[in-house]
Image (tube, rainbow, N blue to C red):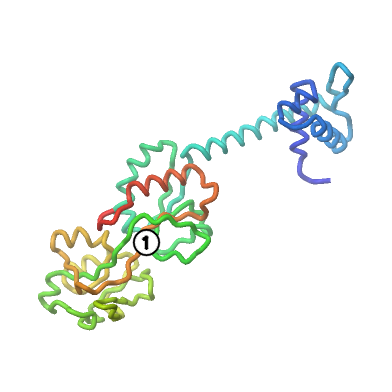
Amino acid sequence: MSKLPDFEGLALFAKVAEERSFAGAAREAGVSVATVSRAIGRLEARLGGRLVNRSSRRLALTALGEQVVAGAARSFREAQDAEDAARDLSRRPRGTVRLAVPMSFGLRWVAPLLPDLLRRYPELVVDLHLSDATVDLIGEGFDAGLRIAALPDSSLVARRLRPVSALVVAAPAYLARHGRPEHPKDLRPDHCLGYAYRARQGIWHFTGPEGAQASVVPAGPLRVTNADALLPVLLDGLGVAELPDFIAAEYLADGRLETLLPGWHLPGGALSFVTPSAQARPAKVEALAEFFAARLSGTGSGA
């Protein structure tokens, strides 16, 4: 005998007691009368006694049936309530959604959108995790993530939102002291600042005119786990760094930084909305996906 309760038998017995009819219970449950009869017989065998007495005209609960029916009806209602709540949750954006986002992008572009998101979905609770480290969405229980990187994990489903360019930049003060490089080989590795979570093992791989290739291994005095930490040293004219366009844009616009090596390009990336699976995603995740697709998609240097 199974150690689990006979949930089906209890549920159908509750309907039989409510309808005072096997046929009525079958009709309400959407099953055959034979299914109801088998379930009641199975439950009686499990409990060791009759639950109902039937005649051609009426059905009555036995003393055992009277003892069991209240608990059976309560279990049936609780199961219905659980299903209704789950069904409602799958249709409406509500509940907690755990979202992993790179720190600099999250602070600049995601956090300012949160007021609109929460006003639009007042039953949503956002658990926002900001880190430049690659998060194991499945292993750490995240519902979704925004990523600016290659996505080697084939178990994840990605929706590309916008391209992200990588720019090599320096301050005018640096260029005044050291000159403007015309070729990647003119970059001094000991002046090139590093980013710990950069793809391609931290090497700057350039593609130039007519497909020419060149590489630089940064060996400067600073290596960080968040690209924003490069800015004070960069702005003080103490080095050269690679920055994503969404960080560099405001400093390029007001002249505090300048783009180097026109005609030479680093491999670009993309911002993607990533989930563990595209199948049967709850409404809260679908709402998040559509919201960020509408607000963050584009091709410019701003999101």
Task: Give the left or right position of residue 127, taking residue 64 as reference.
Answer: left
> Residue 77 location, x and y as percent?
66, 30
Kind of residue at disc 1: Ile
> Residue 68 location, x and y as percent?
79, 29
Task: Give the left or right position of residue 254, taking residue 133 as reference.
Answer: left
Classify 10 Å Cα crowding around label 1: few (below 14), some (14-19), many (20 and above).
many
Which residue extends farthest top? Answer: 57
> Residue 285 location, x and y as percent?
46, 46
Per the image, the residue denoted by label 1 is 148
Which residue extends farthest front? Answer: 210
- In the depicted structure, whether residue 198 falls above or below residue 56: below
Residue at 25% x, 58% y: name it.
301
Residue at 41% x, 66% y: name it.
150
Figure quadrant of residue 165 = bottom left
- In the depicted structure, whether residue 124 falls above or below residue 237: above
- In the depicted structure, whether residue 99 falls above or below residue 235: above
Figure quadrant of residue 183 = bottom left
Figure quadrant of residue 170 = bottom left
Residue at 13% x, 63% y: name it.
255
The foreground one among 165 and 223 is 165
Tell how many labels: 1
Task: Give the left or right position of residue 175, taking residue 272 as reference.
Answer: left
The foreground one among 134 and 249 is 249
The foreground one among 280 and 146 is 280
Which residue extends farthest left? Answer: 176
